[in-house]
Image: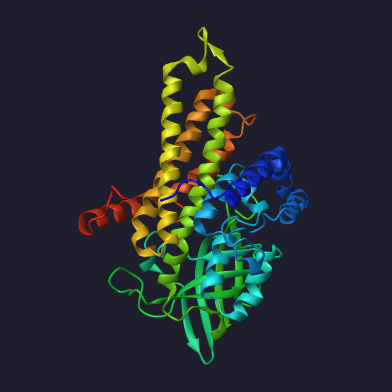
Amino acid sequence: MEFTLRPELAELRRQVRTFVDERIVPVEAQIIAEDRQKKYDTLRGLSEQARAAGLWTPHLPERLGGRGLGITGMCTLFREMGRSPVGARVFNCDAPDQGNMDLLLSAGSAQIQEQYLMPLARGETTSAFSMTEPAPGAGADPSNLRTRAVKDGDHWVIDGHKWYSTGGGDAAFLIVMARTAGEPGRGKSGPNDASMFVVDRHAPGVEHVRDVGVMAEPLLAHREAEMRFHSVRVPESAVLGNIGDGFRLAQKRLVPARLTHCMRWLGLADRTLELCKAYITTRESFGHVLARHQLIQKMIADAATDIHAGNLMTWHCAWMLENGQAKEARPYSSMAKTHVARTLCKVLDDAIQMHGSLGFSEDKPFASWYRHARSARIADGPDEVHEVLIARDYLTAGLNLLVG
């Protein structure tokens, strides 16, 4: 595995880092304030600058306006975008749109790509991914899937209840996971019992019930929509892939999506530690600057080690995906996701502690960032589900820990 970036990618990384630090970070509070009023002037202005600089959707193929970097190239740039909570959105690389673009690109028909992918790639629309359901529906256990699609002539009729469809309220379309065979419950549901459908957000029968109030303040597209589907009719052309491909496509989307989350989280963790360094090397307490106290040094050492370890885990898994080892990469993506999610939460928690009452205040961004970061240990599968998968593969499949 090669850790030296090729010159053109290293230059792109420098450009993105400079753009984030010099253009986005100084106005991120303004972007957030405008978002509360449903205004996006500053965000759109920066997006146009990113597009003009050739930094727009770099993960997409060139024919869609990107740079066709592949997932290891994405690792390089997404870490820099993640330094700001609004950074990825400026470059049209935020969740869920980025993952949905990749899914439509790989599984969408030419018609779907023209109608839905192209406007999404241009930044003219947003999208949502509707898989999670309120209890007793699908959450960590996808076999509980209750939303159902029934064939009716040359259409499918969808009925169901979803929530945590991030950005669903404002989306132009939703990718909906629905049961097309079998029954909910472990042992009753098979691997080919679900399918994915592209559904127009404003189609008859699509109801936006509410945005679910959560621990973190809503931010840009990260509003957790509750949706209901009342006999929503979609044509056969709305199917992604083939009928019965739902669970397979979900894995195809979620494994790299976990990594893109990791990349963005690592960028924010790294920036957090930089802010800590600036503070503890100047703030004096008990006769010394804080950086000379061993307990503070322990926090810094742990954070630096965890960020570096998460970075290597993410790189390794991305390298596997790029080399056609998607199935083999699954447990490694679970390792990366659980480790980096916990690292981000721990780094932010320690940052608050190192800054004392200042860190707990809104004068520093750590409290706000932590409220968003806490969802990382639940999104795309809670820690416990990933740990079960890792343990299972180690105990039964001979998971190799000393890779290389």
* Side of 223 where 131 appears, left or right: left
Location of residue 59 in the rendering, given as x and y in whole percent from the top left corner: 58, 59
Residue placed at 63% from the left, 55% from the top? 221
Residue placed at 66% from the left, 73% from the top? 202
Q: Is residue 21 visible?
A: yes
Scheme of image coloration: rainbow
Location of residue 200 in the rendering, given as x and y in whole percent from the top left corner: 63, 74
- Camera-side residue: 375 or 63? 63
* Side of 30 where 222 appears, left or right: left
Q: Is residue 141 above or below residue 232?
A: above
Q: Residue furthest bottom?
A: 153
Residue placed at 48% from the left, 32% from the top? 349
Q: Is residue 218 visible?
A: no
Q: Is residue 311 above or below residue 286?
A: below
Residue placed at 67% from the left, 39% from the top? 21
Location of residue 258 in the rendering, given as x and y in whole percent from the top left corner: 46, 55
Residue 116: quadrant of the picture: bottom right
Q: Residue furthest front?
A: 7
Q: Residue furthest left?
A: 396
Location of residue 321 in the rendering, given as x and y in whole percent from the top left corner: 43, 60
Q: Is residue 206 above or below residue 225?
A: below
- The total of numbered circles placed on residues is 0
